[in-house]
Image (cartoon, rainbow, N blue to C red):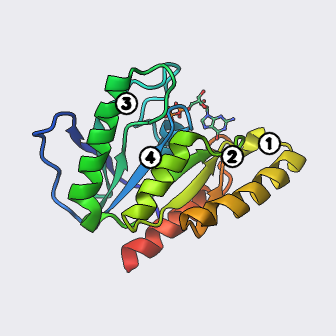
């Protein structure tokens, strides 16, 4: 898909903020802080819309980007950053729960980002388990594969092949925002889901 127009349509920062009109659907992106979510959004869109941070765990808003006047990418706040307080973690949970409860019906697929270099962390398994309990089957994006040697890559891919189905996940895409590897596969998923 050719990205011709991207605009930050809506920022949801407070409990009373209203979600935007549905358009053709929405694709939320969620993952641990520092997983590479902003880099992925920028790479997919071919421009810098999301802020690549050296100071993770800061964004607490839900940002709606309207693509080609048709559908949304939804940048959800990152989770699992070790340095945030319990209160902040609780706030994250509330924001994210509100999002899925209010927008479930308009979601085409959830892109759940996981760092390809590591095993799943507690916060990842919590999110995947929670999505599974809501009946949502995410498309997992394994980020930063360019950082893996071919041996590490094989080992990590067999690890994910083993654990992801335990959470009902059937589709995962290893990719890199640096080399652009497999970004077109993410676009293929988006185009397919929009056609359904
Ligand atoms: P976010 O906190 O999830 O939005 O993560 P960012 O996009 O800000 O990225 C966190 C760090 O990982 C930054 O230093 C990025 O440059 C780096 N990064 C993100 N994606 C990739 C990737 O695909 N390959 C490599 N090598 N580094 C990446």
Residue on which disc 1 sits: 148
Crowding at dot 4, Cα within 10 Å, few <14 / some 14-19 / many 20+, comes out as: many
Q: Identify which residue is drawn at 43% across, 36% down.
A: 78
Q: Position of residue 96 (x, y in %)?
A: 31, 45
Residue located at (59% from left, 70% from top): 170
Question: What percent of the width, then of the height, locates residue 58?
Answer: 39, 24
Which residue lies under the disc numbered 4?
A: 30
The residue that label 2 is drawn on is 116
In screen coordinates, is 5 left or right of 190?
left
Q: Position of residue 148 (x, y in %)?
A: 79, 42
Extreme residue toward the right, this view:
151
Q: Are marks 1 and 2 in contact (CB under 8 Å)?
A: yes
For marks 3 and 4, give the one nearer the viewer. 3
Alpha-carbon neighbours of circle 2 within 10 Å: few (<14), some, or many (≥20)?
many
Question: Around disc 3, counting alpha carbons within 10 Å, would you say few (fewer than 14), some (14 to 19), or many (20 or more)?
Answer: some
Picture quadrant where residue 12 is located: top left
Q: Earlier in the sequence, mark 1 or mark 2?
A: 2
Where disc 3 sits, the SS reads helix
Of marks 1 and 3, the one in the foreground:
3
Q: CA distance from mark 1 to mark 4?
A: 22 Å
Quadrant hosting ligand 1: top right
Residue pointed to by mark 3 = 89
In the rendered structure, the answer to whether residue 69 lies left or right of residue 148 reads left
Where disc 1 sits, the SS reads loop
Q: Residue at x 48, y 47 (%)?
A: 126
């Amino acid at each position: 898909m050719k990205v011709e127009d991207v605009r930050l349509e809506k920022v949801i920062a407070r409990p009373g903020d209203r979600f935007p009109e549905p358009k053709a659907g929405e694709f939320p992106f969620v993952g641990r802080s520092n997983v590479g979510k902003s880099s992925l959004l920028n790479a997919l869109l071919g421009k810098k819309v999301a802020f690549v941070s050296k100071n993770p765990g800061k964004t607490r808003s839900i940002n709606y980007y309207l693509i080609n006047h048709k559908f949304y990418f939804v940048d959800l706040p990152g989770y699992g950053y070790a340095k945030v307080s319990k209160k902040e973690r609780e706030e994250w949970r509330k924001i994210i729960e509100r999002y899925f409860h209010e927008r479930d019906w308009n979601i085409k697929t959830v892109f759940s980002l996981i760092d390809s270099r590591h095993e799943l962390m507690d916060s990842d398994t919590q999110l995947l388990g929670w999505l599974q309990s809501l009946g949502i089957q995410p498309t997992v994006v394994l980020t930063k594969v360019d950082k893996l040697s071919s041996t590490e890559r094989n080992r990590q891919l067999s690890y994910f092949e083993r654990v992801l189905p335990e959470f009902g996940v059937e589709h995962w895409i290893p990719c890199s925002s640096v080399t652009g590897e497999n970004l077109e596969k993410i676009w293929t998923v988006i185009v397919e889901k929009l056609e359904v």
